[in-house]
Amino acid sequence: MKSSGVVVFLVCIMLSLSGLVDAGPQETYNAGELQIALEKLNVLGSVLYLAAHPDDENTSALAWLSKGRKYRTAYLSLTRGDGGQNLIGPEKGPEIGMIRTQELLAARRIDGAEQFFSRAKDFGYSKNPEETLAFWGHDEILADVVRVIRKFRPDIIISRFPPGSGGGHGHHTASASLAREAFDAAADPTRFPEQLQTLKPWQVKRLFWNSWRPGREAREKLMSADVGEYNQSLGMSYTELAALSRSMHKTQGFGAAGRRGERQEYFELIAGDAASNDIFEGIDTSWGRISASGDVAKKIASIIDSFDSSNPAASLPALLDLYDEMEKLGDNVWAEQKKKELLTVIRLSAGLWMETIAEDYSAAPGDTVPVRTTLVNRSGVEIRLESIDFASSQTDTTLNVLLANNTPRTVESQLTIPHDIPTSQPYWLGDNSTIGRFELIDSTMALLAENTPSLEANVTLNIAGRRINYRLPLLHRWTDRVKGELYRSFEIRPALTLDIDENVIIFPDGEAKDIRVTVKSHTTKASGEIRLAVQDGWKIEPESIPFSHESRYAEQQFVFTVTPPPGASLTELRAEATMNGRVYDRALVEIVHPHIRQQVYFPKSAVKAVRLDIEKRGRKIGYVVGAGDDIPQALSALSYDVQLIDDAALGNGGLSDFDAIVTGVRAFNTRDRLPHAHQSLMDYVKKGGTLVVQYNVTAGLLTDTYGPYPLTIGRERVTVENAPVTILAPDHQLMNFPNRLGPQDFEGWVQERGLYFPSKWDDHYETVIEANDPGESSKKSGILFARYGEGVFIYTGYSWFRQLPAGVPGAYRLFVNMLSAGDYDEK
């Protein structure tokens, strides 16, 4: 389980006033952004945009609604994208879900919207909403949507996908149907009454579908808005801003160019009150919706009129007076929201810098951590620091000191980490999730985009006689020699983590293998014993090994010898450490990409061990990496010598040493050199080589020539992982050499059979197997086999990139048969 790269942080256009956790100190605005924040105080309208996945949202609409119309705007993505693919690295499953969560949060920091999720898992492509809702659990995910509506209280909801079957992907269509159901259910006190202990029913005024690009006739029946307007304060249009936001979806390859000029978005009313000119028509978005608001609106207008961008602190007396007025409004949803926004405006107008920094980036329960909290008052207004309170660690410092203008004030603390504090595990990644839904101890947590900070400082200030509280997340700061000042969230880690080198361990014969386990301490003076646990029939030597570490982050690697039982077998190896009577069984995964904040994850320290009945031919495999996958490691586990082929080797024809060459997933979408290397690859095949080309997607193809004969990539797929497979040619070499295959080899597959099967192919290609989803026609082109000269070319859309890392035995056997295809005549 590896990490790569060094984290860098996005320079934010504007902080979303959403309460989302930041991994850097509280951000600053320029004068234009502060002007928008002031104007937003006088707008009490809200919009919830709803769709199925990260990257489904319309960032142009979100930017226009949030920063143009200044409504409180949020995006509800039902899933975290855990079943999606990854253009920038090998992460899959929970890890890609974590990355795509952070990509959404990075996008929201740019376009100014907030972010919500439900418990639904992205389990891969679904062809209809019935299948989707069966996996998700209709009532459970509907309850999540209703909870978000009752909590957020949107005036309108906008669905990205249309009702009916127009959404394509079953997740898309399901999101539209859930939006329609939740529109009614959120207002019904008999629906999900358990939520009403803390929430109230809420009637949304209107539900819209954000229509695709409609024809001229259809436009006349829809409402429209120009989201391409230019914002003088931002110095860009909302569509330019949206491109920056959209480009955060890097795992999906959604880098976008900024649009300039008019851009119409269209909205079709699905439910609620009719409107003719504007989506908010007839909805009061002023302070008039709070009957006791008094002069609040006038005070805000006066502050806006007199605001001096060269001296924002001059507005502080009026802003503090406004805060007093809002305090009088009592327990009101809008009053509480606007107070949060006002606190940010007050802090920024005072030029107030606040941060609380841990000496180290992590600690284990029971450890003591040195912390420095620093404040700088960069205004002429009198500000006193009254106290700093770390409630979760029972540390409280009473100070009552004046913060002199532009003079840093630092307070040092020693925090003892509580023994019962939870680790910094993404809250949705528990151990009991189903294939379609995250199971949470507390379902109300599904409202959160990510974990709340492990530790926070509650800072009490007295600003010109008013007592005001700010909460600061505990961070770690360091200086990178290239990138400069960097931050990361402070992490609570288990005292010990255990990493096994491989994700899947393959035993292609009865021979024993050495398995390396790395024990890492996240506290000082750690000692105990480690062991590998496994089911009966597998032999582990030695039974246990002692370890001892003096310092935090010390690592020690231990070797266990694992001997498989006779015959095919599948088991799980579990690494465990015992220290002071407690068992530690978690691994450490750190996810680092430059466009997101560094993430940490503690899955169970366990790997699949697969004893295969398998034969193979050839030894040296060349691999052309595409969008990133774990197949090279999987082939290395079979004792192949796998070498990655770079662009230079592709172009110079130096391929003859390889027994087989494999192109990785989406290689023809991502490797610019491949179209120019076609002749070299075909010469390699013609002279007796074996070339296996894995799936590519139709969008962004760099060439339409992949093999010796024409074939056209389509969009057909088989999404049901246990869909029946029919062997079309039982006597074909791929079914018999060097491993004889049968129906049992297509059992136990994960997530899907395959994707983007060719839609057309030349008669030179032979089809070998076929499969289909229920109620659909058979798909025969998942494997296309052709002899060319003395060699073999194979195009395959089956999802080997999922099956091999998951340790699916039959997938290994068939893949080895493909790699061995060129040796068939030599058997």
Image (cartoon, rainbow, N blue to C red):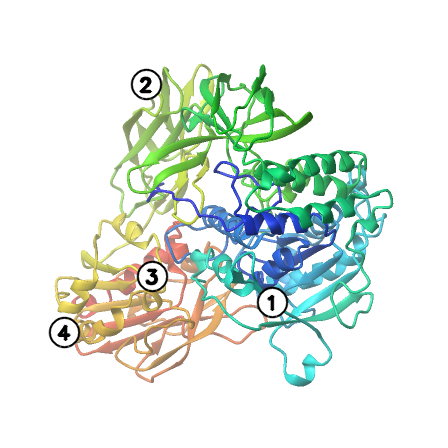
The mark that comes first in sequence, 2 or 3, is: 2
Residue 38: image location, x then y, percent = 65, 47
Q: Secondary structure at mark 4?
A: loop
The mark that comes first in sequence, 4 or 1, is: 1
The mark that comes first in sequence, 3 or 1, is: 1
Gap in Å between the C-alphas at discs 2 and 3? Answer: 45 Å
Q: Which residue is labeled 1 in the image?
A: 227
On screen, residue 667 above or below 119: below
Q: Which residue is labeled 3 in the image?
A: 814
Q: Which residue is labeled 4 in the image?
A: 687
Q: Which circle marks residue 549 in the picture?
A: 2
Residue in front for this viewpoint, 245 or 579: 245
At label 2, the amino acid type is: His
The mark that comes first in sequence, 3 or 4, is: 4
At label 4, the amino acid type is: Lys
Gap in Å between the C-alphas at discs 3 and 4? Answer: 24 Å
